[in-house]
Image: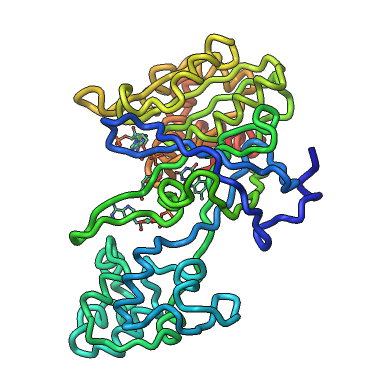
Amino acid sequence: MSTVSASVFSRKNPFPAKHVLNRRLSGASSKKETRHHELSLSGSGLCYEVGDSLGVFASNDPLLVQEIISMLGATGEETISGNDGSPKPLREALWRDYCITTPSKEFLAALVAKAGETAAEIAELTGDLTRKKDLENYLWGREIIDFLLTYPMLLWTPEEFVKCLRKLQPRLYSIASSQKAVGDAVHLTIATVRYETFGRKRNGVASSFLADRTGAGGVVPVFVHTAKHFRLPEDPTTPVIMVGPGTGVAPFRAFLQERKALGGGGQNWLFFGEQRRDSDFLYQTELEELQRDGVLSRLDLAFSRDQETKVYVQHKMREASAELFKWLEAGAHFFVCGDGERMAKDVDAELHAIVSRESACSAEQAAAYVEALKHAKRYKKDVY
Ligand SMILES: Cc1cc2nc3c(=O)[nH]c(=O)nc-3n(C[C@H](O)[C@H](O)[C@H](O)COP(=O)(O)OP(=O)(O)OC[C@H]3O[C@@H](n4cnc5c(N)ncnc54)[C@H](O)[C@@H]3O)c2cc1C
Ligand SMILES: NC(=O)c1ccc[n+]([C@@H]2O[C@H](COP(=O)([O-])OP(=O)(O)OC[C@H]3O[C@@H](n4cnc5c(N)ncnc54)[C@H](OP(=O)(O)O)[C@@H]3O)[C@@H](O)[C@H]2O)c1
C-alpha cells in the first residue's frame, strides 16, 4: 500500500471516491438517523491513520438549487463566475461551488440595500454590532431561500446574487475504520442532519448528500485530514480510555480495529452513550464481539432516554471512578470525541472530579493533574 505523501490527492485535488455502502445504524423507532458509510479509496494512493478525519466536498440539493433559480427568475443557463473565477452556468455554480443555505453578511447587506424599509428588522440587527446574539437568534433556522420567498419582489441578477454567497466548504468526518482491517476503504459514522423550521423541512448539506444523493456507486470527492493530536499511544500495550457518545464512537471503532490488528494486548475501555438501547446502540454486534474477543476490555453504556432521569457517559465515569483513576495511574491515555458544546465540557468536569475524589486532593491539584495529562499528550480530544 502506498503512503500519504505518494498520493496526488489532497484538499486541493480531492479524490473521487466511490460510495460503496450507506447503511442506517439507528433503528426504525429512533429519533435520529445515524448512518454507516463506506467509501473506496482504491487507486487513490491515499492512506490514513486511525484518529484522522476525512474531508468531504458535498454538492447541494438540486431541488433547492432549482427553487433558488426560479426565485431569481433565471433559467440556470446564465453564465456567472464560479468560486474559482472561471465562467460557468448558474445552475452548476449553485450546485457545487457556493453555500446556498446559510445567509452570508454580504447577502443580508445586499438584501437590506434592495428591500429598504421592508427589511427594517434585518437592517437593525445587522447594523448594530452589540446585537450579534439577537442576529444569531433571528437567523437560527432561516436559510437564503426563506429570504427570497419573503422578498419575492426584489430583483437579483445571477452574477450579483452569487457574489453575495460564500464558498461551499468541505465537511470533516472522523474516520471509523483502520486500514489494517479494511485496506483501501474508509468508513464513516454520520448523523444525518434533518430538522424543520418555519414550516420547511431542512437537510444538512453534506450529511444528506451522503445519505440521500450519492446513490450506489456514486462519487464523493474526499481528502484525508491528518489529526496528529488524536493518535493512539505508540506502545500497543498502553491502556486507553475512550469516551465517545453518539457519532463520537467513530474514531474509537477505528482504534479498536487497529488495536485488534496490532495484537499488542493493551487494555481498551469504551464509554458509549446514545438515546435508547433498542434503537441507538450503534455497532452493538461489533462491540459485543470485540468484548468477547478480549479486544474491548470494558464497555460502559449510557442510554440517556431509557429511564426517567438522563444518564450520560460522565455519570458512568463517576460510577467507575476508582477504576478509572487506577487506569490513569497505570499510564492510560484518555480520549474524548463527539459533541464539543456540552458533552466534552461535562466529561472534562467529571474527569477533574474523579481525580480530586480518588486522590483526595483539592480542585487546584486535580486541575494540575489533568493539565499534566494534557502536557504528556495522554488527554486527547476531537470534538465538534
Ligand atoms: C473534526 C470533526 C469531526 C467530525 N466528525 C463527525 C462524525 O464522525 N460524524 C458526524 O456526524 N459529524 C461529524 N462532524 C460534524 C460534521 O463535520 C458536520 O458539521 C455535520 O455533519 C453537519 O454538516 P451538514 O453539511 O450535514 O450540515 P450543515 O448544512 O452544515 O447544517 C448544519 C447546520 O444546520 C443548522 N441546524 C442544525 N440543526 C438545527 C435545528 N434543529 N434548528 C435550526 N438549525 C439547525 C445549524 O446551523 C448547523 O450548524 C465532525 C466535525 C469535525 C470538525
Ligand atoms: N441537528 C444538528 O445540527 C445535529 C444533528 C446531529 C448531530 N449534531 C451535533 O453533532 C454532535 C454529535 O451528535 P450525535 O448525534 O453524535 O450525538 P449527541 O447529540 O452528542 O447525543 C449522543 C448522546 O449524548 C447525550 N448527551 C446530551 N447531552 C450530553 C451531555 N451534556 N453530556 C453527555 N452526553 C450528553 C445524548 O442524550 P440526549 O439526547 O438524551 O440528551 C445522547 O444520548 C453534537 O454536537 C450535535 O449537536 C447536530
Q: What is the x, y in percent for residue 150? A: 21, 76
- Residue 122 in view of the camera: yes
| Res. 51 image quadrant | top right
Q: What is the x, y in percent for residue 68? A: 34, 73
- In depth, the one of 326 and 76 nearer the eye is 76
Against 117, residue 47 (above or below) is above
Count of numbered circles on the image: 0
Q: Is residue 293 left or right of residue 357?
A: right
- In depth, the one of 59 and 293 nearer the eye is 59
Q: Residue at x 38, y 80 (%)?
A: 75
Q: What is the x, y in percent for residue 143? A: 31, 67
Against 46, residue 239 (above or below) is above
Q: What is the x, y in percent for residue 298? A: 51, 15
- In depth, the one of 239 and 24 nearer the eye is 24
Q: How is the image coloured?
A: rainbow
Q: Quadrant of the N terminus?
A: top right
Q: Residue at x 71, y 17 (%)?
A: 264
Q: Residue at x 43, y 38 (%)?
A: 35
- Residue 349 in view of the camera: no
Q: Residue at x 56, y 37 (%)?
A: 187
